[in-house]
Amino acid sequence: MNKIVETTIEADPKLPIIRLTRDFAATPAQLLRAHTDPEIFVQWSGPDSLTNTIDYWDARTGGSWRYVARRGDEEYAFRGTFHEVGPERIVQTFTFEGRPEGVALETLWFEDLGDGRTRLHAQSLVDSFEGRDAWLQSGMEVGVNEGYAKLERLATEHKI
């Protein structure tokens, strides 16, 4: 039986920040590729019940992106700008178009643990504690955990 790995999701008590941490059986280069290659990204991002389609994707410093997640007739669009794309970290904005005033500044970095394992750290800074709490109460943990489980499978099956 496979061990279920959960992502640690923490709300900073002093700043409107959400921090995520999860270990993967993948190298930093594999995780970087999974976050920057649109063909791989659509396979793992979000809950199992949604299907993603890329509208545009330019994963370079100064580039931008937009994708749409669908479940039946429901659509959820997300967009952002890559502020920095490097081998060890990604800095980007993240906006759910259903709440366009809630822009997050996200930083992801990849900690090499050796032996083909990496700890992914992600931090999302939003404009208010209310906005942060709305994200936390949105059910984001389902999308994060199901998405990262799919990412882990892609890595262990050598598809990234």
Image: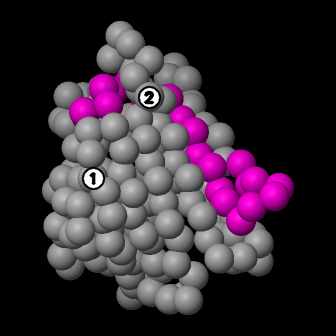
- The residue sitting at 71% across, 48% down in the picture is 10
**Pointer 2 residue:** 111
Q: Quick check: can you spot residue 137?
A: no
Relative vertical location of residue 61 with respect to residue 35 in this rendering, above or below:
below
Residue 19 in sight in this render: yes
**Mark 1: few, some, or many residues within 10 Å (few <14, many ≥20)?**
some
Which residue was labeled with disc 1? 85
Looking at marks 1 and 2 on the same chain, the residue that comes earlier in the sequence is marked by: 1
Q: Nearer the viewer, residue 15 or 150?
A: 15
Q: Residue at x 18, y 76 (%)?
A: 56
Residue 20 lies within the magenta run? yes
Count of numbered tags: 2
Which image quarter holds the C terminus? top left
Residue positioned 76% across, 77% down in the render: 130
Q: Magenta segment range?
A: 10-30
Q: Position of residue 36 (x, y in %)?
A: 24, 53
